[in-house]
Amino acid sequence: MPDSRLKKPEHRWDNLLVWLRDHGMKSDLLVERRKTPGAGHGLFALKSCPPSTPLFTIPATALMNIKTLKTTYFTRGSPESLTAIQLMSLHLSLYRPQGEEDSPDPLFGPYISTLPRDFDSHPLTWLVKRIQNMAPRGDVNLLQCLPPCVHDALQKLHTRFQEDWAAVTQFMHANPIATPARLVNRISPDDSDSLMDFVWAWLTGNQHTAPVNTRCIYHRLKASKSDPDNVTMCPILDFANHTSELPHMTPVPSHADIWNVAPVSKYGDSFSFLSPGGIFVQEGEQLYLTYGAHSNRTLFVEYGFVNHVTDDSILQGGCQGVQGNIDLQDMVEPLIRPEDPLGSLVKSALMEEGYWGDWTLHSSPKPAHPSYRLMTALRLHHLVAACGSARDDVLQPWRDVIAGQRDTISDVNENDWRQTLVTVCDAVIERAEPHIGAKSEWSNVSAEEEAWLPWMRGNIAMLWKEERLVAIAVKASVLHGEEF
Ligand SMILES: C[S@@+](CC[C@H](N)C(=O)[O-])C[C@H]1O[C@@H](n2cnc3c(N)ncnc32)[C@H](O)[C@@H]1O
């Protein structure tokens, strides 16, 4: 067990290592945790190593997931009545460290004690606080400063959060004996402290793969490869920051992955990671993971940070990792006017064919372009507007285009939707400009406590900058007559 005298924050990492060794971790740890400028902690190489070197292995019993938690909460033989994410969030919420204390969790205490103590800088925290009428930190209501499509994405995340909160509070109501008596009150549907503990837990226990958001990673635990409960929290690994460009660490496929079966052992397989392939890592270099090919909108909403974008990376394609991507739902929906009779028919047709929403612009691959979904929606909008009708025979040429039986509806229709796209791009550019002028404290400020507010303003300005640059790039493509 960890030495109970080692209670100061700087010893929490050491306690975690002792605890992991108690769980059977061998001394093959080639990484350490260090502070980074601007991204909290990160993982760094303890010594230089060749490509694809084993860096560390976390034993199955030290991974927090549905297998290692289920005997604590579910009656033997009964169905698992919470998803993996809900179960991890419940457990974390019950054992959230209070103040500077360590987590009282008898199962994962030394691990939970190393996790970030709050997610005040995360947009979901702002949204829940606003709904609860709790004063936001800092003097600016950052939610009002978000680009509309980012705000919409945050609302969707909040809906997922609320569903999990409802499932967990119902579970606790139906299974009051699942937790030690002194902790039962930590989950109460009407108590704002419980809710804020759950926000912390949910953001902690959620990251790296859809559908989760901040600290989870795919790990094969179930018979089916695509089971959403194939996720785990993984000590040590979860200090790895994201890169979309540099070579990154990779998991070693487990026995269950290789044979495409559920793990044989009760708690699943252990989890090992390799140094980046193809490069020598130097001692002291930061080791990254790639959380996924996410847009900045997704990174911001799910993880609370964004990738840096520059004029060059969007307009010239100067940086491979940056793929500017903006969503135009809030601009295009008012054009269609679903509240009007014709607009409502356009909406129905788009929904029927699966083309309603997710209308995006992309800076790469070159040329910068609208998504096929957006072109499809704009083509239909102009067809119906030009004919003043949405009868089946009017819609047929549009259906032929989506069925691949013709390239376009007509030259006039192509010209119309391209013109509209230019107008929409102009509106996006104009709307973004006032939000970009604020000086960006992007590079030098740490993301922690007192400093997070200016850092976050820089992130939000970056989202607006991306809106503007991607709109400029797509407008230029249309005006150059690019075919998409
Ligand atoms: C899995 S954790 C990584 C460890 C984290 N830095 C920490 O100190 O606990 C993911 C979180 O790290 C931060 N992060 C990860 N990659 C980042 C990056 N490239 N830039 C800024 N922040 C990043 C974000 O706050 C994200 O939600």
Image: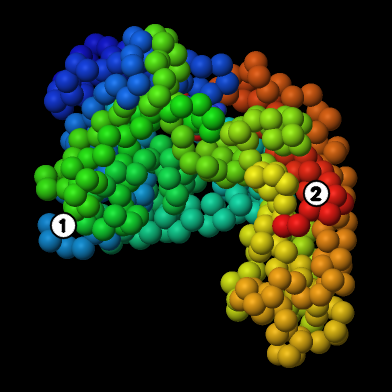
Indicate whether 411 appears above or below 22: below
- Observer-nearest residue: 303 or 466? 466
Query: Which label was assigned to residue 477?
Result: 2
Query: Which residue is drawn at the image coordinates 61% and 33% (left, top)?
Result: 320
Q: Give the structural element (helix, strand or loop) at label 1.
A: loop
- Identify which amino acid the numbered label 1 is placed on: Thr
317 vs 69, nearest the viewer: 317
Identify which residue is drawn at 76% across, 31% down.
Answer: 311
Query: From this viewpoint, is residue 42 visible?
Result: yes
What's under tag 2, amino acid-wise? Ser
Q: Which residue is mark 1?
A: 75
Mark 2 C-beta closer than 8 Å to ligand 1: no
Provide residue 84's location: percent of width, then percent of height. 31, 51
Label 2 crowding class (10 Å Cα cut-off): few <14, some 14-19, many 20+? many
**Identity of the residue drawn at 85% across and 84% down:** 387
Where is residue 15 shown, x and y percent of the image? 26, 17
| Displayed quadrant of residue 207 | top left
Cα distance between the residues tagged 2 and 1: 60 Å
Residue 428 seen by the camera: no
The answer to whether 411 is drawn above or below residue 272 in the figure is below
- Quadrant of the drawing holding the C terminus: bottom right
Label 2: state its secondary structure.
Answer: helix
User: Which of the 4 image quarters holds residue 408?
Assistant: bottom right
User: Which of the 4 image quadrants contains residue 481?
Assistant: bottom right
